[in-house]
Amino acid sequence: MTKFLAILIDGSIYASWLFLMGLGMTLIYGVMRILNIAHGSLYALGAYTSVSLIGFYYATGTNPPMLGYAMLPLAAIAVGLIAGVLIERGILRFMYGSDEVVMLLVTYSVFLILEDIAKLIWGVDPYFAYQPYGLLGTVEILNLIYPVYDFLLIATSLVCAAFVWWGLNKTRVGKLLIAVIHDREMSMALGINVKIFFMVTFIIGATFGALGGAVTAPKVSVVPGLGVEVIVLAFAVVVIGGLGSIEGAMIGSAIVGIVRAAAVHILPEVELFVIYGVMALVLAFKPSGLFAGPEVRKI
Amino acid sequence: MNIQKDNTFRTLTFGLFIVLVFGFFATDWLRFLVQMSLSTFLVVLGVMLQMRAGLVSFGQGLFYCLGAYIAGMAGYFFGITDVFILILAGMAGSILLSVILGFLMVRFREIFYANFSLALSMILYGLLVKAEILGSTDGFNVPPSTFIGLAPKGDTLKITVFVLTCLIVYIVSVVLNRYLNSTYGYMGDAIRQNEIRVEYLGASVHRVIHRIYVIAAAISGIGGVLTAIAVGHVDPDLAYWTTSGEFVFVALLSGTANVMAPLVGTFLLELLRTYAFEYSPYTWQLILGVTMLMVILFLPNGIWSIGAKRRAGN
């Protein structure tokens, strides 16, 4: 029973982390048809920025400790805005209309570039920002002790999901965006400024990626190469759910989260293997993922 | 129309002699550099072969790693160190796996092909990382090779392995060049251009892609074996997605027009890596990324296309 509960809680925590990563990726793919490998670097940049901001905030010792949490979204928004605009305006917009595979390679090169830019800015030493993690204390559930911060992570993830759902389904802008997703040319013809939508989507997607890094930073030591592993995990989640589908990203992260947690508790040897095993299994039966809509063939 | 005579065979043969002569006089590290680029060149050839059919494999590391591990394990567990057996075993293993996986791969195109190949190679990575008997993340050492009963030592061994690598790469390149200029080879191009048309002309797209996948896997497997022999060590990173990404990088950088194109690309990359590690270890990926962007933007057909354009008189 305890083991089952542990799997469930660990799985949810891991899933919510994965979802934050997958959300931005799937959003960008859905709107722009770009599978963004650079998402991993945005994650790393988010982590680095939040570590720096947190360090800066707590260094004086006079600021109210609880307000330190504001640094996390602040870092994410800063990275999302700056890196997002630079990447989209500086590089991606010259490539629109290329094959999806070419876009994949373009974002791969952006990823390589950003990896080294992070090294140039922050060096190669590890950074720590433990304050937000310890501040909330722990909670005991049936003899299992969990840091409250982890539940904050789940909450963040849910809020982001709700925000995107509300934005897409309940606002005018969201409805326009859905039109762009379904048919880019037609929505252009109807007078929607697709360029602006592309830029804003990329910024929002990048912000989610950076947020993923920002909220993870207090839990780990921030070192170079942080984004390399994240990117394939986010890949797995998004591909399992179906590229471009937000529900898909949710289900995908839930599946991967629970499966990994189960593997860790029951058979630790297969921890890494199961994630990609599940991915390959899903793809073998549904080549475009669980939730991908039917492909419309245009003539 | 002016059809160009194919000089590839002549150039390759000529190149072989140059490289062999060079190998005897070069310093150890330079010879090793050439040898490493020749081994990885085979894997890049595999990636290039698929690229010609419009398929980008982000998981060619799967067969690279498989070949290397087969070579390593044969020596480590069974004491088999004869290079020819190792190469055959690595090739056979890759062919076997790729024939099976090929039935799944043929259903994917474009980024789904990239994703699925990536997932497959990460599965192998995930397995190897947790396999304690194989040294987990550290990998293990490969025993020194023998040649049909002969066991040279020291410098002789290094030279022998070098000559063997050159010869094998030469044979593979010649055969592959012949293949690319055959009907089967051109079928790959046709698939990239228009899949439906290929079906209408009476060829099976699935079978062509399957064949390409298996050939690519076989030569990548050989590349893996040669790398294991050269380095004397294997570890799971060979199957990690960044390794595969590098192969894609080189294939893209070089272009897919000719088997010799990746040869230049691989050597340039190895050289760049060696010097960049030495002089600016923190910016070497930056250099790679910028180069790749420039190539995608300005030379969509790779570096090889510069020479090709000039030869065509444009």
Image: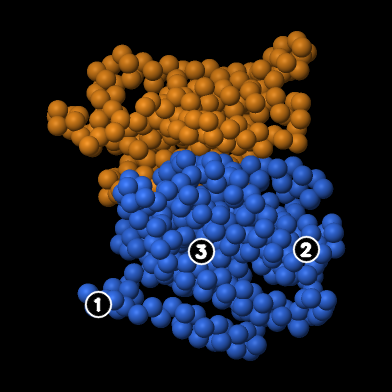
Q: Residues within 10 Å of mark 2 (few under 14, many from 20)?
A: many
Pick whichever, B55 or B269, lies toward us: B55
Describe the colour scheme in one phrase: by chain
Q: Which chain is orange?
A: A
Query: Where is residue A173 drawn, in percent x and y?
Result: 26, 22
Residue B45 numbered mark, or none = 3
What chain does badge 3 belong to?
B
Q: Which chain is blue?
A: B
Q: Residue at x 54, y 26 (%)?
A: A253
Query: Where is residue B255 drawn, in percent x and y?
Result: 40, 64
- Label 3 residue SS: helix
Vertical relation: A118 (above or below) A215: below
Q: Residue at x 52, y 34 (%)?
A: A283
Q: Residue at x 75, y 82 (%)?
A: B155
Q: Residue at x 49, y 55 (%)?
A: B212
Vertical relation: A168 (above or below) A187: above
- Labels 1 and 2 within one chain: yes
- Residue at image mark 2: B142
Residue B2 numbered mark, or none = 1
Residue A100 numbered mark, or none = none
Image position of A291 (left or right of B3): right
What chain does badge 1 belong to?
B
Pick whichever, B229 or A194, lies toward us: B229
Front: mark 1 or 2: 1
- Label 1 residue SS: loop
What chain does badge 2 belong to?
B
